[in-house]
Amino acid sequence: MKKYLLIAAVVFPIVCLFGVMLSKQMRLSQGSEVILPIAGFDPRDLLSGHYLTYRINYGSSPDCSRGQEVYACFFKASGPEELYRARFAARDDISGGECALFIKGRCENGRFTAGIEKFYIPEQYAAPLDKAVRAGKGKIVLQISGSGSAAIKDLLIDGKSWREFNQQ
Amino acid sequence: MKTQKLTAHLADWERQGLITPEQSGSILAYESARQTTPWVLYSFVMLGVTIIAVGIISLVAANWTDIAPWLKLTADFAILGGLAACLYRFSDGSQPAVFDAIAAFFIFFCLASIGLIAQIYHTGGQPYQALFLWCGITLPVTLFAFKKFIPNLWAAAVLTAVILFCFHDSRLGGPAGIYRLAIFWSLPLSILLAGMLCRSVRPLHMLAGPFFFWAGMTCLGATVYFDIVHSSGIILENSAHPARLFSYYGYGARHEDASVHTLYRIIDLVTVAVIAASIFMKGLDKKVRIFLCLLAGLFCILMNIYGIIDYSAYPRHYSYSGSDYPMLLKLIGPACCIAMLLLASFLFSCLNHMRLFNTCLNLIGLRFLIIYFQVFGSLATTGIGLIVSGLIIIGAVIAWYKSHKKLEAWFGGLLG
């Protein structure tokens, strides 16, 4: 009996981690792609290493109180670039079906946050990427599902993937 | 060392005629044959495992972008699977130190895996979320540990996650802030309650000791902080200090602020739960129950004191050391600190933890000395004050020894 319990105990974390990985992977492979301009800098976290943290330029700011649940409804901006912009709305406005592409987030310090404000990068590329993002050359590629959850797909610098940018 | 002590004891008992030389020989033979735990080796192995694990986490954090994500994840899960198989292989208990070392490595590797997944999928979560996930998924493995290292690690990780959660949003206020503050203020009692629950539930037994340890440490920390904030006059003199939060919430409590009332009621609720657990938990000595209840009650008063005393009645420019500050308020901090330490020392005495008992007594002595320097200033008054304090302590101890049976019976009656 104890052997079976031990097997369950060691399999449990592996299954949980696999589940987390799978849900992230599914989020990344479903839904629509959205590109948004960003501005930010690079701190470091002890567990996962260097990352860029940035403010996404949604084109507008939400009018909300701290901690309030807000929805960002996306629409394609007019212009040469394939960029998206967002208007912010409450849940009721989203559920009416007027918004096909949206993400759920919260209001923090007068800003909209949706857990998509970090992009992990290798330490050796941190400085040039940080410089490029600070210079306003960065854009973030998101994959947004129909249920309003978003996953980060790529970081673009001058319209190219950050990997290509670093190879130049 | 242990055998030397035992040999000396056996020789003494033989001389006193309590045991025969044959019995002495049998006891020695039995103790020598018994497999003793090489705790020094165990500790160094665990230290090594911890350092290796931190190194692996750092390697993962280095972000090897040239390796494809699927390959990194496959390697990660393969290593986790291999470690799980090793754990199963050593689960018969023949080599507990090896099992614990692999289990510790497995647990640390789970943390590294969380970091790797966060890195590959760019998850924007907070560190406390990663720690909570880690603690949640590794709890079952923790319960299979043979020795205390892994349960201690787990309890420390839970505590860190809770504290990070409480301080996640530095601007306290609003309903969410109140709950975070309530969790933080009642942390020592909550950990004590967790320890009691673990002690009562057989599979969680291993976690009781670490929780009790952290309950003691956080309780001591909270008491010392309360004392410093109070007796240094920080509340009144420095409006920018975080301690002003205490008086702010105290003000809210007296002025019928609903959210502040929620804060105090949560603390009261945790206190009631600790008192109930102290009364109903099985296998506790009556004295231990009494001192646990008294400690929880006093801690609750300590946390509620800002709602009881109106500090706003004293202008901020009043000097704490000046004569215009009431003596009673000057003494609240040290009095509460000494009372907590006194109750803790009684509790440790009942639990036969002589070293902890002596530590508490030394701290009480130290606090008495500091009081007189803080409050009175001159050496003559300090000397007289200390002599009077010493006499009061000796008198109280004599009175306790003369009437402790009556008092115990009275408290026993209260607890049923």
Image (cartoon, rainbow, N blue to C red):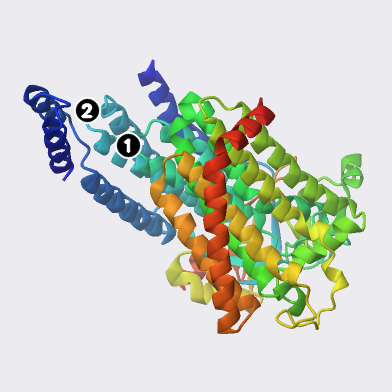
Residue B85 visible? yes
Q: Nearer the viewer, mark 2 or mark 1?
A: 2
Q: Which residue is mark 1?
A: B83
Q: Name which quarter of the figure residue B415 lies in.
A: top right
Marker disc for residue A168: none
The spot of residue A54 in percent (x, y) is: 65, 67
The spot of residue B353 in percent (x, y) is: 41, 44
Q: Residue at x 67, y 32 (%)?
A: B276
Is there a contact, CB below 8 Å, between mark 2 and mark 1? no
Q: Which residue is mark 2?
A: B94
Q: Residue at x 70, y 45 (%)?
A: A149
Q: Chain of mark 2?
A: B
The spot of residue A142 in percent (x, y) is: 66, 54
Secondary element type, mark 1: helix
Q: Amino acid at mark 1?
A: Leu
In depth, the one of B394 and B198 nearer the eye is B394
Dot 2 or dot 1: first in sequence order is 1
Q: Marks 2/1: CA distance? A: 18 Å
Quadrant where the image shows the C terminus of chain B: top right
Q: Chain of mark 1?
A: B
Residue B74 visible? no
Q: Residue at x 64, y 53 (%)?
A: B165
Q: Residues within 10 Å of mark 2 (few under 14, many from 20)?
A: few
In depth, the one of B106 and B258 nearer the eye is B258
Q: Residues within 10 Å of mark 1 (few under 14, many from 20)?
A: some
Say above or below: B117 vs B91. below
